[in-house]
């Protein structure tokens, strides 16, 4: 069933009400999630949401309105309302708004999916979570939790420039966590939550049940492990932690709306200055970061973004030099750039905005074993536990679940409460070894925007080594 | 009977028809009208509105539980919701933690003022004008904010929100209510420094964009030319905007009934964990002249009420929904939410009780300093005045060690005077320890209502003067 007609009606109504550009998205979204705790299912939810969001540009001002009604009269009313809101924006108008050129496209796209995750019986999914948490509990976890989430999104996009695009994106993922509760603190080990634009095969590959006992044993061992020492040292990060490092200290920093000040009051700005695009050294020559929504199966993959721009791979950092941004059609025009393609909304009721797609590191020449073998004295950290970064995306502090001493090229004692801190470009310039063992990690909880939106982003990453990093920060 | 309650009753009947009378069902219907006018570079750049009605059904059938929701509220949509939730409940593994349904119980609200606090006795509460606010009214406040900043670059938002909700279950509980909120949050920017002004209200009419814009601009001007300070322990005065972050983290991680039953919270009931000057109350219905910020019932139909979390330094309670209450051998405190079974129930409207007025009356000071913080600044020998905290994340939930950064204005105070602006600082600090016995030097005399960035919560926070705060980094690293 197509919803192009309703989207088209909204666009036409906005134009009739004075808009010089309008676009509309009809979205039908189904989500399903389940959690289990200590061998019992705790929560099972199945949600369905359908509606239309329309965006209107009147003069130099935008307006957006959304309704949970897929009838054509409701769509037309929404289009008129969006134009009215845009007219109100003109009370405090900014400079003229232009949009970069986008060829009108009529297209259809769907993500690859071997096993439709919504078709897997709930009883099978529940059994999986029950078995995983039971296995963790039996192996010594005080608290064992597991869960999965599924998103099935269909959308129909129409613009006043002639775009007509429908897409069907299926995403899923899951994880398991073991907690050990001590006298004064809680230790946690988890299989890094892995999510992608794939089917249930992704969850099966995670082997939640097989990994659960190891996680429980590690969590318990952490309670009595020595604290991560404080000081400057060589730091080796596992791939999932490096994925979050990329997300926070590169992905958000290269969002053009932040660079232009559009997020200044909330998410923040960026330390990057457009006048230095193409010249600024962001990191070492090993650092090659791409923006790649075409990456098969990664969580930030799509065929077209929410402005109708086709998915295209491009570099954000090449050989350590900053060369690209995440952009939308209006922000790119302000910056004098000729590309967009990174605008998305988290549902029909939210305004599309600049978001990460798949922002990741190109593989390096080493392996993790080679990196450890080449390190005389350092710390290895894996699996994120806490993350914090300033509003310009410079000063970061991350905590990991587990650390290991590295001495004379070997992995040594387990270390508890490992943390590290630094300044983005200084940190990235210290990267001197990078593994080729890339995994496309997924982040399903990226918050941005007001009203808040939760984005799904992908981050291909592999283990890497950094020098002279401050570790062991604690309160 | 509201349209939402009629809809909820219809779903309850559908459950009885399709699942039989033995099924236990809870139905929440929520109509949510949200409008937000956002500005940056001193112009409105995003201006959005939505009006959505959603239905959420939780069903317990033959010992198994499933939840479903939909925005499709026509006959077909509702029947589909009930049908697939029944189907899910029949095949999911058993749910030994099911705590049963809320029995019929009256709401704690003032007659004639749904949504207002029962103890307020004041004729405020739900404000129709806020519920019906127009884009032009929000834009007018933005224009006033921008103008009052005197040419400084500005950014922020003006938000109005209206919720009309109902709850019904198969045990006979059927309640409804509505609430409205307005909020404004903006910064002014000067020479690389930002200043902020932020306020929540139950009436849009109570938000004065010009007052807020002038305050943000004064802070931004005073924050220019910052110096860098080394890490270490600093005496601090936290303005209300920063204190709201403490209340949020205490609530989500400490006073969370599920975290508490799982022994992951610092909270120990009956223990003197805070300074005797500290009293924290969750106030979904408002009190002490504050309009009601929340609905008068939770997502399980339990009537909302005030909950004393900390009284005079002694931890008294944590928030419960029916599940965590059953596990703890307690009663629900009315804090169920759609996510509380997974993430735990937590207070959404915490208020730190304001302290006594300063001896000798109000203390003068520059407009960059919040009024309730001025007496503390005047008596601080050497320390920091902090406007706002940002990107705070928990390193360990049990000790509630949090790392984060300062934002929107930090100053060095020496001998009772603000002497220099300071660049943003990173801290790593146990929040309960910072407010522990003997560590609170003073609590401001005015609680300021502050919005949550994501909506749904509100904080009433005075300024705080603390003996020590652990600064662990600065702009250099």
Image: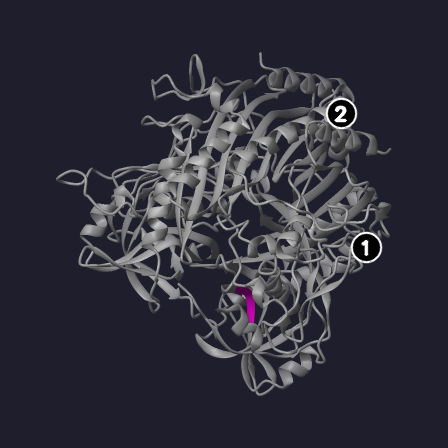
Identify the magenta region. Answer: A399-403
Q: Position of residue B246 (x, y in %)?
A: 39, 48
Residue in the picture at 37% in, 48% down: B242
Residue at the spot of label 2: B77
Secondary structure of residue under mark 1 = helix
* Residue at screen point 70% across, 80% down: A366
Residue assigned mark 1: A201
Q: Nearer the viewer, residue A366 or A404?
A: A366
Q: State the SS at label 2.
A: helix
Query: Can residue B162 be spotted in the picture?
Result: yes
Tag of residue A407: none
In this rendering, the answer to whether B135 lies above or below A237 is: above
Q: Is residue A402 magenta?
A: yes
**Subunit bearing disc 1:** A
Instruction: Please indicate, yes or no, whether residue B331 appears anywhere in the rendered image.
Output: no
Q: Residues within 10 Å of mark 1 (few under 14, many from 20)?
A: some
């Amino acid at each position: 069933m197509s919803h192009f007609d309703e989207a088209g009606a909204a666009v036409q109504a906005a134009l009739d009400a004075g808009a010089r550009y309008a676009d509309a998205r009809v979205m039908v979204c189904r989500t399903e999630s389940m959690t289990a705790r200590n061998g019992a299912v705790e929560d099972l939810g199945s949600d369905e949401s359908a509606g239309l969001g329309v965006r209107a540009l009147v003069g130099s001002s935008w307006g957006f309105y959304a309704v949970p009604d897929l009838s054509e009269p409701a769509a037309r009313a929404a289009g008129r309302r969006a134009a009215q809101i845009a007219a109100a924006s003109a009370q405090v108008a900014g400079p003229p708004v232009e949009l970069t050129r986008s060829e009108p496209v009529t297209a259809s796209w769907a993500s690859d999916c071997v096993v439709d995750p919504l078709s897997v019986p709930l009883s099978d999914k529940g059994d999986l979570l029950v078995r995983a948490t039971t296995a963790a509990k039996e192996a010594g976890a005080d608290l064992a939790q597991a869960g999965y989430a599924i998103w099935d999104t269909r959308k129909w996009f129409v613009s006043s420039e002639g775009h007509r695009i429908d897409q069907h994106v299926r995403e899923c993922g899951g994880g398991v966590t073991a907690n050990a509760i001590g006298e004064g603190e809680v230790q946690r080990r988890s299989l890094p939550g892995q999510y992608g634009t794939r089917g249930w095969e992704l969850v099966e590959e995670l082997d939640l049940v097989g990994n659960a006992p190891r996680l429980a044993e590690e969590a318990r061992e952490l309670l009595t492990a020595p604290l991560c020492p404080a000081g400057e040292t060589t730091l080796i990060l596992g791939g999932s932690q490096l994925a979050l490092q990329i997300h926070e200290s590169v992905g958000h920093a290269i969002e053009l709306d932040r660079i232009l000040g559009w997020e200044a009051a909330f998410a923040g700005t960026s330390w990057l200055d457009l006048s230095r695009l193409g010249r600024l050294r962001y990191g070492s020559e090993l650092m090659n970061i791409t923006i790649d929504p075409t990456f098969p199966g990664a969580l930030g993959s799509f065929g077209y973004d929410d402005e109708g721009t086709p998915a295209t791979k491009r570099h954000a950092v090449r050989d350590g030099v900053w060369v690209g941004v995440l952009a939308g059609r209006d922000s790119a025009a302000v910056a004098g750039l000729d590309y967009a393609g990174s605008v998305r909304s988290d549902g029909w009721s939210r305004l599309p905005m600049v978001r990460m797609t798949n922002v990741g590191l190109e593989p390096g020449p080493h392996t993790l074993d080679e990196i450890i073998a080449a390190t005389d004295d350092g710390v290895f950290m894996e699996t994120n536990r806490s993350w914090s970064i300033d509003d310009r995306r410079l000063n970061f502090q991350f905590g990991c679940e587990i650390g290991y001493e590295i001495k004379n090229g070997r992995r040594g004692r387990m270390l508890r409460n490992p943390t590290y801190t630094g300044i983005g470009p200084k940190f990235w310039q210290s990267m001197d070894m990078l593994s080729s063992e890339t995994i496309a990690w997924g982040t399903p909880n990226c918050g941005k925007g007001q009203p808040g939106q939760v984005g799904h982003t992908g981050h291909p990453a592999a283990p890497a080594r950094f020098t002279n990093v401050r570790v062991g920060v604690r309160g | 009977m509201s349209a939402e309650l009629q809809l909820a009753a219809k779903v309850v009947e559908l459950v009885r028809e399709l699942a039989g009378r033995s099924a236990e069902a809870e139905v929440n219907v929520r109509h949510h009208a949200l409008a937000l006018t956002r500005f940056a570079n001193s112009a409105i750049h995003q201006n959005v509105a939505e009006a959505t009605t959603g239905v959420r059904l939780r069903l317990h059938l033959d010992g198994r539980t499933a939840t479903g929701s939909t925005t499709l509220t026509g006959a077909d949509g509702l029947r589909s919701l009930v049908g697939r939730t029944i189907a899910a409940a029949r095949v999911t593994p058993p749910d030994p933690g099911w705590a049963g349904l809320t029995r019929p119980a009256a709401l704690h609200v003032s007659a004639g003022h749904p949504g207002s606090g029962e103890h307020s006795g004041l004729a405020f509460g739900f404000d129709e004008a806020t519920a019906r606010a127009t884009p032009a009214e929000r834009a007018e406040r933005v224009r006033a904010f921008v103008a009052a900043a005197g040419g400084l670059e500005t950014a922020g938002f003006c938000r109005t929100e209206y919720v009309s909700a109902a709850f019904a279950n198969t045990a006979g509980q059927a309640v409804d209510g509505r609430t409205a909120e307005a909020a404004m949050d903006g910064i002014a920017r000067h020479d690389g420094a930002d200043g902020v002004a932020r306020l929540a209200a139950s009436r849009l009419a109570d938000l004065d964009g010009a007052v807020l814009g002038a305050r943000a601009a004064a802070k931004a001007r005073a924050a220019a030319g910052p110096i860098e300070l080394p890490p270490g322990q600093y005496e601090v005065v936290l303005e209300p905007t920063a204190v709201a972050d403490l209340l949020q983290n205490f609530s989500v991680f400490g006073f969370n009934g599920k975290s508490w039953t799982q022994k992951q919270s610092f909270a120990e009931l009956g223990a003197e964990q805070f300074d005797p000057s500290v009293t924290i109350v969750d106030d979904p219905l408002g009190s002490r002249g504050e309009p009601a910020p929340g609905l008068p019932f939770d997502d399980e139909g339990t009537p909302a009420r005030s909950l004393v979390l900390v009284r005079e330094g002694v931890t008294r309670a944590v928030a419960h929904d029916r599940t965590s209450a059953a596990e703890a051998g307690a009663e629900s405190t009315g804090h169920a939410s759609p996510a509380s079974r997974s993430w735990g129930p937590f207070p959404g409207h915490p208020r730190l009780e304001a302290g006594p007025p300063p001896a000798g009356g109000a203390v003068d000071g520059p407009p960059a300093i919040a009024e309730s913080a001025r007496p503390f600044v005047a008596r601080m020998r050497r320390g920091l005045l902090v406007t706002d905290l940002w990107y705070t994340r928990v390193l360990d939930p049990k000790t509630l060690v949090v790392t984060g950064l300062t934002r929107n204005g930090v100053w060095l105070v020496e001998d009772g005077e603000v002497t220099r602006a300071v660049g943003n600082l990173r801290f790593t600090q146990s929040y309960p320890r910072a407010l522990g016995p003997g560590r609170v030097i003073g609590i401001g005399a005015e609680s300021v209502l502050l919005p949550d960035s994501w909506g749904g919560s509100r904080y009433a926070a005075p300024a705080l003067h603390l003996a020590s705060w652990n600064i662990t980094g600065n702009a250099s690293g």
